[in-house]
Image: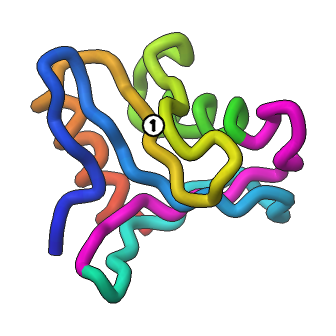
Amino acid sequence: MSAPFRLRDDGVELFVRLTPKAALDRLEGIETTADERSHLKARARAVPENGAANHALEKLIAKAIGVPGSAVSVVAGGTARLKTVRIEGDPETLAKSIEALGHQA
């Protein structure tokens, strides 16, 4: 199983599958697809219009990992369910926090 993130010099890129218009805002753990790629499953109550669901995802991830909201941004997949989210900070610390998210769900 591959990790749902890629380490960068100043943070990580997290791969996320977002389901908008959900009943709750929540992270649901790590899922591996048939092609062996992993991503964090997330649900947001926001609708996928005008970036509302992406903004809700950024806030949800920031809170779960314990970083400021300004450190989290959707950098790819803005209109798709599969997204790449950039999180700025110490890569090793962020990697541990993301791995812990996978074990909680």
Name the colouring of the figure: rainbow
Is residue 47 or residue 68 the one in the foreground? 47
- The residue nearer to you, when weighing 15 against 68, is 15
Q: Quadrant of the C terminus?
A: bottom left
Task: Tell me the kind of residue under disc 1.
Answer: Val
Side of 16 where 19 appears, left or right: right
| Residue drawn at the location 70% of the way across and 47% of the way down | 79
Q: Is residue 56 magenta?
A: no
Residue beneath disc 1: 85
Depicted 32 relative to depicted 102: above or below: below
Q: Position of residue 102 (x, y in %)?
A: 33, 62
Give the residues drawn in magenta, as a range: 36-53
Compared with residue 18, is residue 58 higher up or lower down, i.e. above or below?
Answer: above
Residue at 81% in and 35% down: 52
- How far across and how far down the image is residue 76, in percent? 50, 38
Which element type, helix, strand or loop, lies under badge 1?
A: strand
Q: Quadrant of residue 71?
A: top left
The answer to whether 8 is drawn above or below residue 6 in the figure is: above
Local packing at callout 1 (Cα closer than 10 Å; few below 14, some 14-19, many 20+) is many
User: Can you give x and y, in whole percent of width and height, for residue 62 in the image?
Assistant: 50, 29
- 82 left or right, relative to 8: right
